[in-house]
Amino acid sequence: MTKETNKFHALQLFTDTFTAETVHLTNEAIGIYIRLLCFAWTKNARPFNSESAYRICHCINDNCEKKVDKVLNEFFKKFEDKSDAMMHTVELWIHKRLVHEHEYLTNKYNARAEAGKKGGLAKRDLATSKTQAPIPIPKPIPNDKYDSQFEQLWSLLSKKRGSKYKSYQIFIKVDGKIGLTIEDIARIYNNQIREIEDIKFIPHFATWLSQRRWEIEEDNEIPDLINRLKALGYVYKGAEGSFEKFTKDGKEYKIDKFDEKHQIQLVQ
């Protein structure tokens, strides 16, 4: 039996975002949501059925199951699966953000393990070759400064902000982890900066890549957060650059849409 190597016992919780997303829930519903999050994380963010959700929430009657269903429908994604032996249709639930977080951590620790393995092999080879004369390795002469893939990506950017060389260095590190085509990367970047008139608010492309901002494209956190802050008495004043601006009780606040924690900042 193969040992599970990508099971993480700790789940990072962004408290500001979680509070904003669950401000309308009862304490009982929040408890159900936390139970389901923890259950999904222990299963490596894999899909689970409604019966498993009822069981983990200790449901003993229909009223409890209805409360669990309400939380599932609001925060989890439902899809149908026909992979069982009898080809029966089974309804399963999955949490999109947990899946992304689990994949990110898996790739991160696999890369770290691979680097450690290479370091161990290098030490072993060094120990066995101390008596051997080193063989000089000629440095290859590069044909081009940038590869064709990055050149295509750079040419598709509507506004080329920041250093091209630094952007290329970051691109080399993250390429293969993005999971998107060159055209999709350029489209997402161009869409995110389209409404920014002042160039000083446009993120450098290297910064955009290093902060994994391409993941924001399908994320509905900002519209949902704006609506929930309105419900708390904040007045939405619109966007300025990368910030969403609010007022409340005569004070001005702002939220950086590229800040993963979406922390509310008081404007001095």
Image: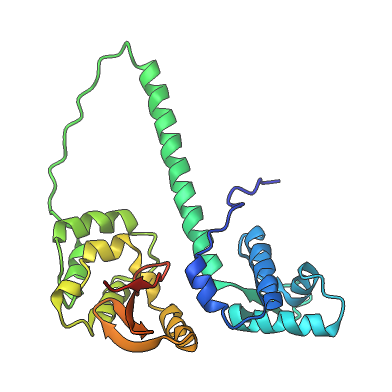
Q: Quadrant of residue 261?
A: bottom left
Relative horizontal placement of residue 47, taking residue 198 as reference (left or right): right
The spot of residue 143 in percent (x, y) is 12, 51
Q: Nearer the viewer, residue 218 or 187?
A: 218
Farthest right residue in view: 60
| Along the viewing direction, whichever of 126 and 257 lies nearer the viewer | 257
Q: Is residue 119 visible?
A: yes
Q: Residue at x 73, y 79 (%)?
A: 68
Residue furthest to the front in view is 250
- 202 lies above or below 117: below
Indicate the quadrant where residue 225 lies.
bottom left
Q: Is residue 236 left or right of residue 58?
A: left
Residue 167 x/y as whole percent: 21, 60
Percent x, y of residue 190: 24, 79
- Residue farthest toward the top in the current orientation of the protein: 131
In-image side of 267 versus 234 (left or right): left
Q: Quadrant of the C terminus?
A: bottom left
Residue at (23, 61) in percent of width and height: 206
Residue in the image at 33% along x and 57% along y = 174
The residue nearer to you, when weighing 153 against 61, is: 61
Q: Residue at x 37, y 59 (%)?
A: 176
Q: How is the image coloured?
A: rainbow
Number of numbered callouts drawn: 0
The residue nearer to you, when weighing 78 against 141, is: 78
Instruction: Using the image, determine if residue 23 lies above or below residue 110.
Output: below
Q: Position of residue 129 (x, y in %)?
A: 35, 17
Query: Can residue 149 be spotted in the picture?
Result: no
Kindly indicate the quadrant of the structure image that contains residue 230: bottom left
